[in-house]
Image (cartoon, helix red, strand yellow):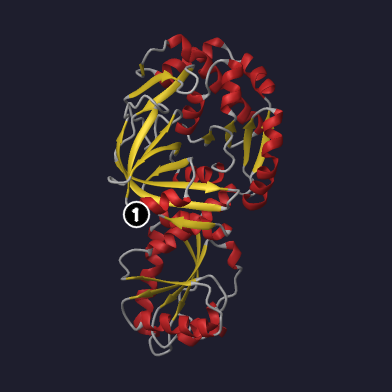
Amino acid sequence: MRKNVFFIPVASTVHTARVQSRIARARSLLSSRGLKVYGSVKPVCSPSEAPSFSPEEYDVVVIFVASGGTSRTLAELAFRKNWMLWAYHENNSLPSALSAKEKLEALEGWRGEIVYSQLKDAPKEVLAEVEASQALKTLRGLTFLLLTGENKLKELKPKLEKLSKVFGLKALPVSFTALMKVYEEVETGKVEEVLKEKLGGVKLARVSAESLKKPLKLYLAVKNLLEKFKAEALTIDCFPFITGKGFTPCIMLSLLNSEGVPAVCEADIDTLPIFLALSKTLKKPVWMANLSGFNSVGKTVTLAHCTAPLSLKGKRTFPARFKSHFETGMDISLDIFLPRGPVTLSHFSLGNFRLTVAYGILVKSQLGLPGMCRSQARVKVEGSLERLLASTGNHQILCYGNQVEMLTRFGRKIGVETVIA
């Protein structure tokens, strides 16, 4: 999806020649970050010179404050608009941006924000705003498989309606009966191929290679359903499936996430939109895990779940081990090695309509703790652990890198309460 920016450079008439190179530099910085820049090349010196356009067609509108003496023009252009004023370190740019903000605040017309740079790189706020806009657009009209029974489907109906209203996501319910019909049609030879291709070299801990075949057959069946219905993601009501069929969907979920198909366990409709937004925007797998413990002294949280992708950091990250499922003892769940590094944790609740975001460092994985789900990681929270624990819920979405700014802006776009730990 093309990332579009509408760019309006504003200057006073006495500065037009002086700032032309600064305008070209600003446009170049945006283009260098993969953004398609539309709008004016020459400076706009009065509101009447501003180009006509439809703001909703662009991910962000940027007014570049090329010079001082522009606060009146800026105030008129930005009145009650959530556009960005990009100020820089020369030519009285920042003073004019601040003066325009004051004027608009007095008129109750300030809706935007000022971003500042020294023209060495595109402002991080602009880039994050584009990513948030792209993430939201990606969700509109996206269809996901909901693999569940009839009772759970009735329970989820109110949340599915809200999911559709807020994000434009479309659920395609598929019963376990329909799923298993497709499962039975999968050829044994294809299962053997997948076993060798996808899972060769994985250590088995008290489980047999034979026990991998049913989960891999499920993986192939779900892939067939995704293709049949042209769905881009899925979630499954795990525990009724496990107790009814005698094996887990953990491998299926892990493999699909590793391949770029967002797949969420426990029919977690709340987690789904942020999980999808991050997966699609970053083009890398993310992981949903339980918040299973914390240490106030070390400011760490322990995350655990049985469905981590084999390639959480964008490449195959062995060693990985297959073990029995924690709650049921059935086959099979995964104990995945997760590399150290900066990560972002997020939790979303449709009921409370709250998004909680925290930045941290993954310091250790494969903890081997016996009393929780098999893939385990310890994350040191860089912000306030107390604020995180006071506002968040159980399921945490973990992705690599610092995505706090993007997620904050994503939350703003959907009007959700956003808490930054």
Q: x, y (%) of residue 241?
A: 60, 22
Q: Is residue 376 above or below residue 117?
A: above
Q: Residue at x 48, y 23 (%)?
A: 327
Q: Quadrant of residue 361?
A: top left
Label 1: which residue? Answer: 383
Q: On screen, 143 above or below 195?
A: below
Q: Is residue 261 left or right of residue 196?
A: right
Name the residue rendered at 54%, 23% in the picture: 219
As displayed, is residue 236 above or below residue 269? above
Write the residue at 43% across / 63% down.
Answer: 126
Residue 114 in the image, given as x and y percentages of width and height = 43, 73
Residue at 41%, 88% (x, y): give it.
Answer: 69
Tell me the SS state at disc 1.
Answer: loop
Residue 240 location, quadrant: top right
Front one among 34 and 166: 166
Residue 202 versus residue 31 in the image, above or below: above
Left or right: 146 as drawn, with respect to 402: right
Q: Can residue 403 be seen here? A: no
Q: Quadrant of the C terminus?
A: bottom left
Q: Residue type at mark 1?
A: Gly
Q: Position of residue 33 (x, y in %)?
A: 39, 57
Q: Is residue 198 visible?
A: yes
Q: Is residue 21 left or right of residue 164?
A: left
Q: Who is closer to the viewer here, 84 or 10? A: 84
Front in this rendered view, residue 309 or 237 = 237
Count of numbered marks: 1
**Percent x, y of residue 133:** 53, 57
Q: Residues within 10 Å of mark 1 (few under 14, many from 20)?
A: some
